[in-house]
Image (spheres, helix red, strand yellow):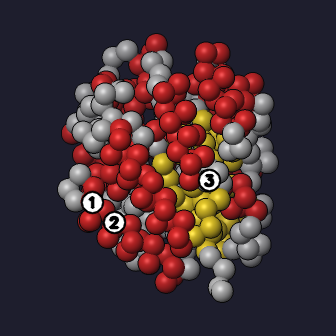
Amino acid sequence: MKPKLKASISLDLDDKWSYMKVHGDAGWESFPSYLDIVIPIVLDELDNLDIKITFFVVGQDAAIEKNHAVLRSIVERGHEVANHSFHHESWLKTYSKEKIEKEIEIAEEAILKATGKRTNMFRGPGFSWSNDLLEVLEKRGYIFDASLLPTYLSPLMRKYYFAKSKLSKEEKESRKELFGSFSESFYPLKPYSWEFKNKKRITEIPVTTMPVFKIPFHQSYLIYISHISSGLMKLYLSTAITLCRITQTEPSYLLHPLDFIGSNEAPELRFFPGMNVQKDKKLHIFRTAMQMMKKHFELLPMEEFAKRLPIEKKIIQTPT
């Protein structure tokens, strides 16, 4: 029997306050959280499915002592933790190189203190990245970056989000790269190596979009489509899986906390797409999606996935 392709599964552990912050809502500065609700739900679902994944943790959450026990439970139950920046600002790419390094460093230390694990994997908030970020990650010994979302839909996603937000003109300008730019749709879907001018390299594992069409198919999109039709959702994911298999694309599949809870658990986030779908239905959609993925792929956390990548990957020069 031909071995299955691999797929990595990860969850960006964006907290309630981070969504409120990007949306321009008052009260985020007190860091309201749902981690104590979301994480146990996710861990129980993963246990039932016998899947191990990677959680990208925001440093600010790890720096708050009341979150330590629930964040430590991620590691205690056999999952990986990775760095999702400290302040979770989607304009990370506008930071100076020195500020980026400080952002990465303080997040590392906070996550280490909370979980007992030092991180060496990174994804930018809002898929934000830059050449300076890549250089900082390589310097600090990171094994990969996972910040790119190669899709043609980024400008539309951003326009929709801004239309639903309470952001000022200045705040919208600072967030103008939220979800990435149209030019990022031309980058590969398969993992590749960034190469710097000094010939050093770092691996990029982009969030996989549907081969050929380059439209997202991670969990949040499936939930949105399922509200129209569960059959359409299954067809959408089945098409993505088939195209991945035809093109030999080993997907990096993305989850978010709001894929597991509804507006009853987080009424402040009713504005977010898919929050009209309640928790029980979301959990059913998650189980269905993971069972479909598991049928065709070997599901792995991201560090294990990265270790099993071919040594000779496509090489792309970093942008200047």
C-alpha span from label 1 to label 2? 6 Å
Across and down, in percent, residue 56 comes to: 60, 41
Badge number at residue 230: 1
Choose between 302 and 169: the one closer to the eye. Answer: 302
Q: Amino acid at mark 2?
A: Lys
Can residue 318 be seen in the rendering of this structure? no
Q: Nearer the viewer, mark 3 or mark 2?
A: 3
Q: In the shown orientation, is residue 149 left or right of residue 231?
A: right
Q: Earlier in the sequence, mark 3 or mark 2?
A: 3
Which residue does the image show at 66% across and 86% down from the upper left? 1
Q: Which residue is mark 2?
A: 234
Up the image or down, 27 lies above or below 287; here it is: above
Which residue does the image show at 26% across and 33% down from the upper left? 271
Q: What is the residue that sits farthest to the bottom in this orientation?
A: 1
Choose between 135 and 116: the one closer to the eye. Answer: 116
Q: Which residue is mark 3?
A: 50
